[in-house]
Image (cartoon, rainbow, N blue to C red):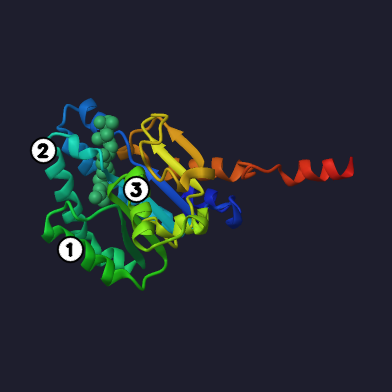
Amino acid sequence: MAESDSKIDTIPPDKIPRHVAIIMDGNGRWALARGLPRLAGHRAGTENLRRILRASVEFGIKYLTIYAFSTENWGRPPEEVRGLMRILEDVIDRELDELDKEGVQLRHIGRLERLDPRLQEKVLQAIERTKDNDRLILNVAFNYGGRDEIVCAIQRMIRDGVKAEDVTAELVSRYLFTAGVPDPDLIIRTSGELRISNFLIWQAAYAEWYVTPTYWPDFDKEEFRRALEAYAQRDRRFGGISPAVEDKVHAG
Ligand code: FPP
C-alpha cells in the first residue's frame, strides 16, 4: 500500500467531510509558468480532476462539487470559452463509461440554457445515465454563479406563489440548484486567492476553508490528504460553542 493510502487511515471516518467543494484555480498561471497556452493549463487541470475524483472515492467522500465555469467566465477570450466548452464535451465523451463504472453520479449546477443545444443534450444524457449511481455524487458547476442561483430561486418561489411568511432558510435551500445536497463541509481553493468568487455563497455559510498556493494541476492526492487532515483538526461550532467549553460553563 502506498504511504499516502496508509496515512489516510489515520483520519477517523467520522472526520472525513461528507461534501467537499473545490475552486480549481491556477490553471492559467500553471500554463504561463511553462510558456504554454492557457488552454494547456485547463487540459492539465482536467487530468488532475481525474486523479482527485479517484482519490475522493478512496477517501470515502460522498459529494464532490467542482467549479468548472462561472457565470463570469463568459468574459474570457472567446477561444478560451470555446476551449472550456470543448473540455466539458470531451470529459463526457471520454470519461463517462469509466465514471459510470466507478459508481459516480453526475449532476449539474448552474444554467444549461446558454450552452450549445448539442452540449446541453449531452450533459442531460450523462445525468440520466448515471442517476442511479451512489458511490460519489459529482456536482459540476458549469455556467454557475451563486448570485444567479439565488435570483433563480427567488423567481421560482414567486412563480410558485410562495407566501412571504412561508419563506425559510430551509425552503430557500430547496429552491437552489443544490436542492437535496448537504451543504459543503470543506471548500478547497487552489492557487492562493482568498476569495469566494461567487461560489456556493448560500451553502458555504458554515463550510471550513482550505486554501493552498499550489496551482490546480499540481494539487495531488498527497495534498488532498493534507487538506482532509487539516479539516479533521477543525472544531466546527456552527455559531455555538464547543462541547468542551459548554461542559465547563455548566460545571461552573
Ligand atoms: C480557474 O483557473 C479555472 C477555470 C476557470 C476552469 C477550471 C476547469 C477545469 C479544471 C477543467 C475541468 C472542466 C470540466 C468541465 C470538467 P484560471 O484559468 O482562472 O487560472 P489563473 O487564475 O491562473 O488564470
> Disc 1 on helix, strand or loop?
helix
Q: Amino acid at mark 1?
A: Lys
Query: According to the image, label 2 marks what residue?
Result: 78
Query: According to the image, label 3 marks what residue?
Result: 151
Residue 65 as seen in the image, left or right of residue 124:
right
Give whichever of 74, 229 is nearer the camera: 74
Q: Residue at x 33, y 70 (%)?
A: 131
Counting from the top left corner in percent of width and height, residue 228 is at: 51, 45
Counting from the top left corner in percent of width and height, residue 219 is at: 37, 39
Q: Residue at x 45, y 34 (%)?
A: 211
> Disc 3 on helix, strand or loop?
helix
The C terminus lies in which quarter of the figure?
top right
Q: Quadrant of ligand 1?
A: top left
Q: Residues within 10 Å of mark 2 (few under 14, many from 20)?
A: few
Q: Is mark 2 within 8 Å of ligand 1?
A: no
Mark 3 and mark 2 in contact? Answer it, CB < 8 Å.
no
Distance between the alpha carbons at the discs numbered 1 and 3: 26 Å
Query: According to the image, label 1 marks what residue?
Result: 122
Q: Amino acid at mark 3?
A: Val
Q: Amino acid at mark 2?
A: Pro
